Amino acid sequence: MALRADASRFYLGYLWWLLEPLLWVGVFYLVFSVILKSRQDDFLIFLMCGKLTFIWFSKAVSQASNSIVASRGLIAKLDIPKSLFPMSVVQESLYKQAAAFILLFVVLVVFGFAPSGTWWWLVPIILVNYLMIVACALVGASLVCIVRDFSMLIPLGMTFLLFTSGIFWNVHDLGDPAKTELVLALNPIAFILDCYRQALMWNTVPDLSHLALVALGAVLLIGGMLALMRRSSQYLALKALTA
């Protein structure tokens, strides 16, 4: 219902699920390829693998962070788990991202990147990516509900990740393997974007042990946040209603 309502507000409706990420990619391609003359091979595909997946993360987490506060009218009437509000936003973003992935696969094939066995690694990569989004969405929604100032800080954090996660530059081109490993270790977004490119562009298997560690961290954070939100449900409701 929310997806239909959102699409009905625009003349092009559901086409914006594809147009918005395409426009973002177009802007970045113009700046970094046409103007700045990026030397990255297959830069358009490289950029799409990074930007389309980063849009999924950034939009889902940013919108989910405000979901509890935005639903205070419903919270005032019903005593329901507060985690449902950010989770509903995350699920909406998943449906939209499915369209973006189809677009990415079509572009890959058109540009000569034939499907290979490494594409099957997208299944665990997308799953871990989803778990990361859920974990960050639950944290963000709780923080914004408790302290409204976080609604200003989260977009700033997304901008920071935009420039530090290797969306339009390759983490493997830093010139120092130790520095590359440090970026991939400290920034899970940079690591997950690199996994997409390894599977789709370079036909290599991602670092499965690192991927498992990221998944484990996300699952533990999700479990902890769900338990915490369940125990503090009344407190979150009070904070949402007194916004």
Image: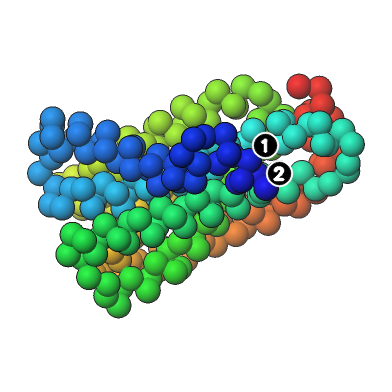
Residue type, label 1: Ser
Disc on res. 85: 2
Mark positioned earlier in the residue sequence (2 or 1): 1
Give residue 113's position: percent from left, percent from top: 21, 65
Answer with the quarter of the image where residue 152 lies: top right
The furthest residue to the bottom:
117
For the point 33% across and 56% down, which residue is it? 104
Q: Is residue 69 visible?
A: yes
Circle 1: is it few (<14), some (14-19), or many (20+) Cα within 10 Å?
many
Nearest to the observer: residue 111 or residue 148? 111
Task: Classify 42 as above or below 143.
Answer: below
- In the rendered structure, the answer to whether residue 160 lies left or right of residue 236 reads left
Label 1 SS = helix
Residue drawn 26% across the image and 46% down it: 47
Looking at the image, residue 231 sits to the left or right of residue 136; the answer is right
Q: Alpha-carbon neighbours of circle 2 within 10 Å: few (<14), some, or many (≥20)?
A: many
The quarter of the image holding the C terminus is: top right
Residue at the far front: name it.
11
Q: Work out whether 146 lies above or below 137.
A: above
**x, y percent for residue 13:** 50, 41
Looking at the picture, how far across and down is residue 144, in whole percent?
66, 30
How many numbered circles does the render carry? 2
Q: Secondary structure at mark 2?
A: helix
Q: Which mark is residue 67?
A: 1
Q: Is residue 181 left or right of residue 216?
A: left
Residue drawn 73% across the image and 48% down it:
84
Look at 68% across and 25% down and name the residue there. Answer: 147
Query: Which amino acid type is marked by label 2?
Result: Phe
Q: Is residue 230 left or right of residue 14?
A: right
Picture coordinates of residue 239, whole percent (x, y): 79, 28
